[in-house]
Amino acid sequence: MYINVSPNENGMCDCWVFNAPFVKRVTVIGVFKDERQLSKFGCECDADMNNMSFLDAEIKERITKKKIYYYK
């Protein structure tokens, strides 16, 4: 898979899957800027979009701490 990280006209990143006729399923693991953008793509999502996971809580805690330390 090749991912072009420069945004296209929609503000999204393009990616190309090589040997696409032979690929039956693609799994994407990533950190998305806004999970609500995923709703316009057709996918079989196993995860709940509104689920606050440990990773979400950890990211918010670290960003909050950095902001507090910056303005101290």
Image: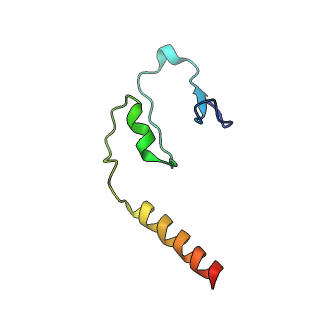
- Residue 54, relative to residue 29: is it above or below? below
Q: Is residue 41 visible?
A: yes
Q: Nearer the viewer, residue 59 or 37?
A: 37
Point out residue 52 in the picture as x, y percentages from the top left corner.
Answer: 35, 59
Residue drawn where x is 34% and y is 38% of the image: 45
Residue drawn where x is 41% and y is 30% of the image: 41
For the C terminus, which image quadrant? bottom right
**Residue that extends furthest to the bottom in the rendered view of this protein:** 72
For the N terminus, which image quadrant? top right
Quarter of the rendering containing residue 55: bottom left
Quarter of the rendering containing residue 43: top left
Point out residue 21 in the picture as x, y percentages from the top left corner.
Answer: 49, 13
**Residue that extends furthest to the right in the rendered view of this protein:** 6
Q: Nearer the viewer, residue 52 or 23?
A: 52
- Residue 40 as seen in the image, left or right of residue 51: right
- Residue 65 as seen in the image, left or right of residue 45: right
- Residue 6 as seen in the image, left or right of residue 22: right
Point out residue 19 in the picture as x, y percentages from the top left corner.
Answer: 55, 17
